Image (cartoon, rainbow, N blue to C red):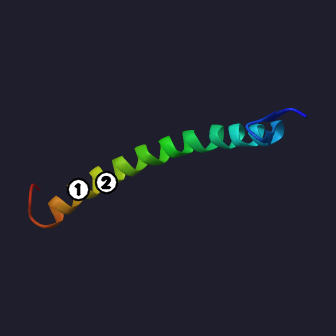
């Protein structure tokens, strides 16, 4: 009965809950990855005789 864009209401609820979980996790992962890349950049510079 209550269909939005051809989907039942509970599927929209599932999509919203999944997005509410995935988006913060993705943001956390991207921040962690950026810090990891910066750390690897500085470590590789030191390893190969760059700025020690």
Rendered residue at 64%/37% (across/down) = 20
Specify the farthest residue to the bottom: 48
Task: Please determine whether, in this image, residue 42 is positioned above or below residue 11.
Answer: below
Name the residue nearer the viewer: 43 or 17.
17
Please identify the residue farthest to the left as the structure is shown.
50
* Residue closest to the eye, 30 or 9: 9
Q: Which of the 4 image quarters holds residue 16?
A: top right
> What residue is rendered at 77% in x and 37% in y?
13
In the picture, residue 24 is in which quadrant? top right
How far is mark 2 from mark 1, CA to CA? 6 Å
Q: Is residue 31 left or right of residue 21?
A: left
- From what the image shows, is residue 18 above or below residue 44? above
Residue 19: give its label: none
State which quarter of the image contains the N terminus: top right
Local crowd size for mark 2, using a 10 Å CA cut-off: few (<14), some (14–19), many (≥20): few
Q: Nearer the viewer, residue 10 or 48?
A: 10
Left or right position of 4 against 49: right
Give x and y (percent) for residue 42. 21, 54
Please give the residue where the numbered disc 1 appears in the rendered image. Answer: 41
Judging from the image, what secondary structure is the residue with disc 1 in?
A: helix
**Badge 2 element:** helix
- Which residue occupies the extreme right position in the image? 1
Instruction: Tell how many labels.
Output: 2
Whole-percent x and y of residue 52? 11, 56
Q: Are marks 2 and 1 in contact (CB under 8 Å)?
A: yes
Residue shown at 43%/46% (left/top)? 30
* Crowd rating for badge 1 (residues with CA inside 10 Å; few <14, some 14–19, many 20+): few
Up/down of 7 relative to 2, above or below: below
Give the residue at mark 2: 37
Percent coordinates x, y for residue 2 in the rendering: 86, 32
Q: Position of residue 18 (x, y in %)?
A: 68, 44
């Amino acid at each position: 009965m209550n269909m939005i864009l051809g989907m039942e209401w509970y599927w929209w609820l599932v999509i919203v809950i999944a997005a509410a979980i995935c988006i913060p996790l993705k943001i956390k992962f991207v921040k962690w990855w950026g810090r990891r890349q910066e750390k690897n950049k500085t470590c590789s510079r030191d390893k190969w005789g760059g700025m020690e």
